[in-house]
Image (cartoon, grey):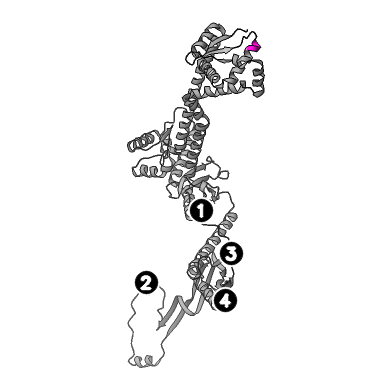
Amino acid sequence: MAESTDLMVQDTDLPDSNRTSNEDGGEKTGIMTMLGNFDMLRQVIVVLALAICVAIAVFIMLWAQESTYRPLGNLETQELISTLDYMDANGIEYQVDGNTVSVPEENYEAIKLQLTRAGVDYGNSTNNGSEILMSEPGFGVSQRLERERLIHSREVQLARAIEEIKKVAGARVLLAVPKENVFARREKQPKASVMLNVRGGTSLSEEEVASIVDMVASSVTGLNTEHVTVTDQAGRLLNSGSQSALAAKSSREYQIEQKREEEYLKKIDSILIPVLGYDNYTAQVDVTMDFTQREQTQRQFNPDMPAIRSEMTVENRSVGSAIGGIPGALTNQPPLDSDIPEEAGAGSAGGGTNGSTHREATRNYELDNSVTYTRSQTGTVERLSVSVAVNQKTITNEAGENQPQAASAEEMANIRRLLQGGLGFDINRGDSIEVVSVPFAQLPDLGAGETPVWEEPWFWRAFRLVMGALVIMVLILAVVRPMLKKLMNPESGVEDDAEAFLDEESMGDETIDLLSSQFDESAVGFGADGSLQLPDLHKDEDLLKAVRALVANEPELSSQVVKAWLNEDA
């Protein structure tokens, strides 16, 4: 009869029995210790990974809530101190990078207004040019460098003066001042370039551009307005200093014609909008202007209105005998005594008297004349052509359908008369006005032209918040949750390992039947005293078969044994 081996298996004695078996084998104890250390290292790694995930989540939340900063400008030291003091006193959030102060973009305009109202300089009036003149030149500064400093000082002063214009946010002036030459023929003319940063939503008028050009030209000796170039931040040429006089004149005349056409269109709108409505007409104006310069001098004489310019009259008259004798002392002697006859008077009265008369007159007459100097005005309207298309009315017929109806001849005549009176129609000038009633094409409804969502200022801030929340959720579900589950419930992992072990070691019905045929069921099992009865096993194959049969017959107890082993290893 084969000998039987008794093995006591109890729930409370399983760890002790395993520990005893471990103590019996030195090699097995070393391996278990190494495995225990490995489990501790794994736990530390899990905790570190969890801490890293939390740090990443916090960083993402801070990044999503972080405000976008916009720089106020590059400040000087004194301005930087005063600006920071004001912001600290009023609790304004800011960032400092060198001499540049940045504030949250959503509060940018409000902070600028506060600084301006408080009288704090934050870069608007820095470096007005006088600092360059008053700076210490140092020893050994060349004359050329000193000259460049003066030119740069003038450039900065002009830029600050131009920035005083309300529509100009920033300006930069570059001066090309040649060196003076003793030879007048070889002397070069100075030139200037002005770069303007126009405020958003505004544009400079011709008068404002002309004022900038005159300001720059009058500030530099010898600079002509034709040599000043003005450009804005969009690259639009506001004033050219390189175009020829003829090209500049043609461009200016074209701009004047466009401006005059816009004025006529505004007049048409003011006349027809109250009558027809905004979308019920369309108009175009063509203006031909005459920019020819004419000068005329005319002199006219009026023969009907003569005038004496000068007159000279000569008159000679002589009566009686003339004084005779030789001039001298003898002539001046008194006459001698003489006998006067008594009847001498009668004889002399009857005779003639001696004398002579001479009269001469010279008169110069001046005719009435007038001198007329005439200079015709340039830019006069030579011809005006206006075309207006009026939309036909929509009426509902008897069938309930909408159909267009043309305006009557009387209505068209009234519109034409309104336009003639409002636009200054002159038939002698060759003006023409055409008013036609036509059906307009129905355009698709494109909506109110709302701004796209992605261009709204709040969109990107919300987008960052949503993306940050999604990343945090992914970290929690994919990384943090499994780690926490493993740390909070380590036994669940042990049970899973035991079940996996049992699944790997489990056998099918065929193997159980084979073991049952080789061993007696009464020889394998548990006794009344709780001892495990096994057949006499002399080979490893027999022991392995017996263990497999035990696992097949007592799966619950076998799982507890494996679980105890795993707990001991942990």
Horizontal placement of 565 versus 123: left or right? right
Please name the amino acid that badge 1 sits on: Glu
Quarter of image, res 408: bottom right
Cα–Cα gap, marks 4 and 1: 39 Å
Q: Which residue is mark 4?
A: 398
Is the residue 392 above or below the residue 141 in the image?
below
Frontmost of labels 3 and 4 is: 4
Quarter of image, res 136: top left
Cα–Cα gap, marks 3 and 1: 21 Å
Horizontal placement of 292 versus 359: left or right? right
**Magenta stretch?**
536-542
Q: Which residue is mark 1?
A: 450
Q: Which residue appears at 39% of the width and 93% of the height?
A: 350
Is the residue 13 above or below the residue 118 in the image?
above
Q: Earlier in the sequence, mark 4 or mark 1?
A: 4
Cα–Cα gap, marks 3 and 4: 23 Å
On the question of residue 491 being in view, the answer is yes
Residue nearer the viewer, 563 or 375: 563
Cα–Cα gap, marks 2 and 3: 131 Å
Q: Which residue is mark 2?
A: 329
Q: In which quadrant of the rendered image does the N terminus lie?
A: top right
- Marks 2 and 4 in Cβ contact (< 8 Å): no
